[in-house]
Amino acid sequence: MKLSQRILGIKPSATFAVDAKAKELLNQGKDVISFGAGEPDFISPPAAFEYAETAMKKGKTHYTPTPGIIELRQEICNYYQNRFDLKYTPDQVIVGCGAKPCIYEALAGIIDPGDEVIVLAPTWVSYIEQIQLLEGKVVVVETQNNDFIPALEDIEAAITDKTVAILLNSPSNPTGVMLPEDTIKGIGQIIIKNNLWLIWDEIYERLVYGQAKHVNAVQVVPELMSRTMIINGFSKAYAMTGWRIGYVIAPKELASKINALQSHLTSNPTSIAQWAAVGVLRHSNDDAIKMKDIFSQRRDLICGLLRDMPHITFPEPDGAFYVFVNVQQCIGKQYEGKVIEDDLSFCSILLEAELVAVVPGSAFLAPGYLRVSYASSTEVIEEGMKRLKRFLQKIV
């Protein structure tokens, strides 16, 4: 039977693949520790359950408006007003079935076949696949040699007459690095000068640690408002991955087109989940802060343990819940007679030897690295890092 070239060209999500393999081994009774999935291990805040239960009891189980219930869209506008001093209206907000489809819809709103979108490497796995699904071209700007911060001249050099957008993610998945305010301002001026769109993915904006401070791109370059699509959601900061609620904020004309697109793809997001999101925006700020504080403690713990290991280096993350570990010193060496050929074989041998699952950097366009999630309990982190250290000590 015929399959489309589009579907044949899709690469499975490496993060889900790692998580699936770990769960398969767990089902076999193996004592696997997985640092693969980008999912908080907390339970969603109480307000999510309270509002969802109330919505069900009131029979709010029918279709909603395609862009989401007005109550949720207004609360999102209130959130951006209070948090970033940015004024949006509900007709600029499209609530979707998670941030991932919202990114796809945002890209679909601006990409024609052959159009180019600039991304920064390392980059989240789904950006690449989504751009290519729309027959766009991914243009990669490398950041590994500059502490994962893009050089403005490299971004300018990547722009062609086919460029339509720059896609930025801060704090970053997979590195946990945040873009400095001066860099954001510089990129903003480049976008304005070249008449481009900015897709600003700030899904981890509440998970920022120490002295670091997250700033929104439109907040620091107000002229970007008419050419920026903001992506955010509830999965990471509020531990609501399974509820599947994200959103895109866009200029009105583009928002109406994204709304039309969504009407043919998913219709509205789940009505009950939307009411749960209303609840957390109204009542769960303290819950989000508590979870962030625990993530901060976990970051300090895992970084302290990693510093005591041979053969590796890493940038200390300012946000999100990942450490991006450089294992290039291990490439070409051996573990108990097995040659570590690249980051993929490193992960495979580690999983086989110590039952520890991590994601290879190649999945993020950064060969020679590992993404290690610390969205796990203290006990899991300590045991997993003990195994990783034991593994690294045997590499010769």
Image (tube, rainbow, N blue to C red):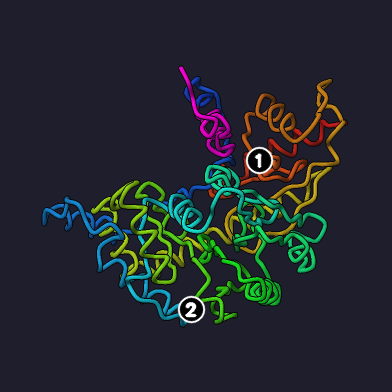
Q: Residue at x 29, y 60 (%)?
A: 68
- Location of residue 177 in the rendering, given as x and y in whole percent from the top left corner: 67, 61
Q: Residue at x 46, y 64 (%)?
A: 290
Q: How many residues crowd around disc 2 within 10 Å: few (fewer than 14), some, or many (20 or more)?
A: some
Q: Is residue 12 magenta?
A: yes
Which of marks 1 and 2 precedes in the sequence?
2
Query: Looking at the rendering, which quadrant does residue 102 occupy?
Result: bottom left
What amino acid does circle 2 point to? Phe
What amino acid does circle 1 point to? Ala
| Element type where label 1 sits in the image | helix
Query: Looking at the rendering, which quadrant does residue 156 occupy?
Result: bottom right
One can see residue 109 in this view: yes
Q: Residue at x 82, y 31 (%)?
A: 394
Secondary structure of the magenta portion, mostly? helix
Q: How many residues crowd around disc 1 within 10 Å: few (fewer than 14), some, or many (20 or more)?
A: many
Q: Kindly identify which residue carries mark 1.
A: 363
- Towards the viewer: 292 or 206: 206
| Element type where label 2 sits in the image | helix
Q: Kindly identify which residue carries mark 2.
A: 84
What residue range appears in magenta?
1-23
Q: Is 214 positioned to the left or the right of 308 in the image?
A: left
Which image quarter is the C terminus in?
A: top right
- Location of residue 313 in the rendering, given as x and y in whole percent from the top left corner: 80, 50
- Towards the viewer: 219 or 161: 161
